[in-house]
């Protein structure tokens, strides 16, 4: 076994109602997008099961292309957010068809 990378997240918001991903990266010398996707899904699944509907990712937490690929979009405040209720209600096969532009 060897380290691949990490995903650091927290529960934030005035009422503890917002998840925040502050790190989603591989260690230097490793490029494994699939591992990052799995880490993100594990973190968001935990947050969703805690009752949170929205999660935001900090702009420098991950590569911009990956953030977009994962489904995060800018909200009215300019934060990169993901609606977990919508995310987990949509089958993976359908999410893959969504236009990411």
Image (spheres, rainbow, N blue to C red):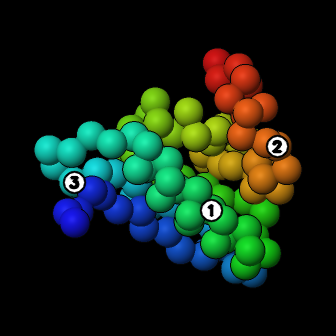
Residue bearing the label numbered 1: 44
Q: Secondary structure at mark 2?
A: loop
| Quarter holding residue 12 | bottom right
Q: Residue at x 27, y 56 (%)?
A: 4
Residue bearing the label numbered 3: 27
- Which mark is first along the chain, 3 or 1? 3
Q: Compared with residue 68, is residue 23 higher up or lower down, i.e. above or below? A: below
Where residue 40 sits in the image (x, y, percent)? 52, 56
- Which mark is first along the chain, 1 or 2? 1
How many labels were placed on the picture? Answer: 3
Where residue 58 sits in the image (x, y, percent)? 48, 53
Q: Residue at x 74, y 74 (%)?
A: 49
Q: Compared with residue 67, is residue 100 higher up or lower down, i.e. above or below? A: above
Q: Is residue 24 visible?
A: yes
Where residue 20 sits in the image (x, y, percent)? 56, 64
The numbered mark at residue 90 is 2
- Apparent side of residue 59 relative to residue 47 in the rendered image (left or right): left
């Amino acid at each position: 076994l060897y380290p691949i990378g990490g995903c650091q997240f927290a529960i934030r918001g005035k009422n503890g109602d917002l998840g925040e991903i502050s790190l989603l990266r591989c260690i230097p010398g490793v490029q494994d997008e699939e591992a990052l996707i799995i880490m993100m899904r594990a973190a968001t699944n935990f947050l969703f099961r805690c009752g949170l509907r929205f999660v935001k990712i900090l702009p420098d937490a991950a590569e911009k292309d990956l953030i977009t690929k994962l489904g995060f979009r800018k909200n009215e405040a300019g934060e990169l957010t993901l609606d977990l209720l919508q995310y987990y209600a949509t089958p993976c096969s359908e999410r893959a068809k969504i236009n990411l532009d």
